[in-house]
Image (spheres, rainbow, N blue to C red):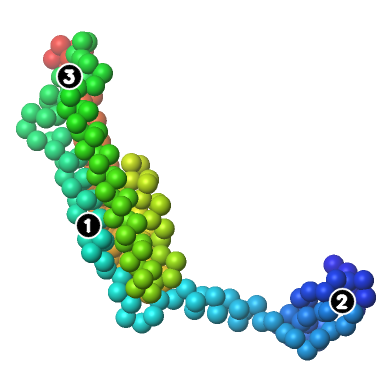
Amino acid sequence: MTNPSVPSTPAGWYPDPAGSPRNRWWDGTQWTETFHDPLQAAQINTQALKAPEGTTTTTLWFWGLVVLTVINLLVGLTVFLPGNLEAAIETGLSDDAPLFTPTDLISSAVNLLLIAVFVLFSYFDFKTLRENGVPKPFHWAWSFFAFLFYPLYLFGRAVVINRRTGSGLAGIALPIIYLVATIVIFFVAASIGFQAAFNESTGF
């Protein structure tokens, strides 16, 4: 960088030639007595993202999101109801099985409806948090990823609220439980399915 003492150097903030940790304003021709403390500015920005003491972070919409997440998890567990898994395996192993059954279509429609309601609740939760004084809450648009990981919004919400208020990490418990339960459901159902397919192919 050109030495600010040279007149051709454009005006701007430069390290204080006196050796202080602050930046000093060079007006293009000479040093001024205007200083800028980067560390203090960072602290001010951090404080600006802190919610006021006693800010309410639990909304009615949040509980609606919790209910929807639990419903989605319970729907996934129905695969283990008596006869459901066996029927699904038998249909999958059948040579003339249809690509989509009426049950599949109904299930997909219900799932899409639940996701749509989840996105709607996330928007109102985000809006309410801002009205309550939480600066820059976790954005509701992340709820569109519910088709990949249902409680992603709830997870991000808990992390951001913790940064803004210093509390709220308890909200991470549900997404973690959901993730673990989903993994267990997948592997248990997959292992049973593979075993059934093996028995079918070997005649046992």
| Residue shown at the point (15%, 35%) measured from the top left | 79
Which of the pair 192/173 is nearer the observer?
173
Can residue 61 be seen at all in this image of the molecule? yes
Image-quadrant location for residue 6: bottom right
**Residue 60 location in percent, x, y?**
23, 64
> In 3D space, how far apart are the residues under numbered discs 2 and 1 (Cα atoms)?
59 Å
| Residue shown at the point (76%, 82%) measured from the top left | 24
Check disc 2: other Cα within 10 Å, few if <14, some if 14-19, many if 20+.
some
Q: Is residue 187 above or below residue 30?
A: above
Q: Is residue 116 above or below residue 92?
A: below
- Can you tell which mark lies on residue 196? none
Residue placed under numbered mark 1 in the picture: 64
What amino acid is found at the position of numbered circle 3 in the picture? Thr
Check disc 3: other Cα within 10 Å, few if <14, some if 14-19, many if 20+.
some
Q: Secondary structure at mark 1?
A: helix
Image-quadrant location for residue 147: top left
Reading the chain from its start, which is encountered first: label 2 or label 1?
2
Can residue 197 be seen at all in this image of the molecule? no
Which of the pair 127/76 is nearer the observer?
127
Residue placed under numbered mark 3 in the picture: 91
Horizontal side, residue 138 vs residue 81: left or right: right
- Can you tell which mark lies on residue 28? 2
Horizontal side, residue 107 vs residue 22: left or right: left
Q: Is residue 138 above or below residue 202?
A: below
Q: Quadrant of the N terminus?
A: bottom right
**Residue 85 location in percent, x, y?**
14, 29
Label 1 close to label 3 by CB (< 8 Å):
no
Q: Secondary structure at mark 2?
A: loop
> In 3D space, how far apart are the residues under numbered discs 1 and 3 (Cα atoms)?
35 Å
> In 3D space, how far apart are the residues under numbered discs 2 and 3 (Cα atoms)?
79 Å
